Image (spheres, rainbow, N blue to C red):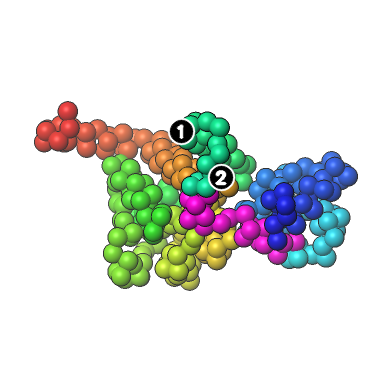
Amino acid sequence: MLTDEGHSDFLNKLLTQRESLPKKQKNLCDYLIENYQSIGVLTIAKLSEAAKVGTTTVMRLIKNLGYESYSDIKKDIYDASMQSTPSTWWHLEESFKNTDQRDHTLKESLKETETILNQTVTYSLVNEFERAIQLLLKAKRVSLLGLRSSKGLAIYMGHLLEEFYPDVQQLSHDTEFLFDRLLRFTDDDILITIGNAPSTTVGIEAMQFCYKNNKPVILVTDHLASPAASYASVNLKTKASSKQYSVLPTILLLESLVIELGRRTSETSITRLQEVSDMLQAKNFTQ
């Protein structure tokens, strides 16, 4: 349940006990506060590695917070994630309700966007980003899936990628053929799913299908409370605003993936981009 201050019981427990903890546990506590939305999928070993503390520190903090086991604390972490990640339409509704702002909408939006962009780039995300790049470098074909409010984002990334990446397949259009195409995935395929809240049933089932068939999936999302996160090979979590609707953190992440992939394959990607540019000019399509 959310408290009057807007924090879940779990976050309040961290904030309340933080100052009384030993230094290492305090550092871990700070990490949990900043990254609790992406902790639910980590093992104790992965959590200790990400937070740069020992596993004994993790276990001691668990005991000091009043939990019997890591499984117990993960349940409260999950609940906190659920409470802090309302749907896209909630964010849009909140944007419409904010009628008492002091500055113009453009200025208010800019300030909030700067805040959530800074909060998006965490230590955990940087690590997951590199794992995603390594998977993309190994793949020979990238398929993209985004439904409802995430569809435009998937289409945008697809257009950027197909200018230099050898094989891009867009799955966001004819969803009645989605599983036919997933069934034809080979070991050289990878799926990028963009699934901001609320998650779609079809999107979750598509990821589950790939998971059961041992095909890698990169999930880009603004919440990890969805069952989809457990089917992903890599989870790339962006920050959602509690004040306004915005997909800019997702766009930042998608564009960064495209840029980094282009850099890592610059020997061919630059040539392919130039070929496209020359062709468009020759056809008088661009000037």
Q: Amino acid at mark 1?
A: Leu
The question of residue 211 being in magenta is answered with no
The question of residue 88 being in magenta is answered with yes
From the top left corner, tell me how far across and down residue 29 is, in percent: 77, 47
Residue in the picture at 65% in, 48% down: 35
Q: Quadrant of the N terminus?
A: bottom right
Question: Which labelled disc corresponds to residue 106?
Answer: 1
Residue designated by label 2: 243
From the top left corner, tell me how far across and down residue 107 is, in percent: 49, 31
Which residue is nearer to you in this view: 93 or 195?
93
Ranked by sequence position, the earlier of labels 1 and 2 is 1
The magenta segment is 73-94
How would you rate the neighbour count of disc 2 (Cα within 10 Å): few for under 14, some for 14-19, many for 20 or more? Answer: some
Instruction: Please determine whether, in this image, residue 49 is positioned above or below residue 179.
Output: above
Q: For numbered disc 1, what is the local secondary structure?
A: helix
Q: Quadrant of the C terminus?
A: top left
Residue in the picture at 85% in, 60% down: 66
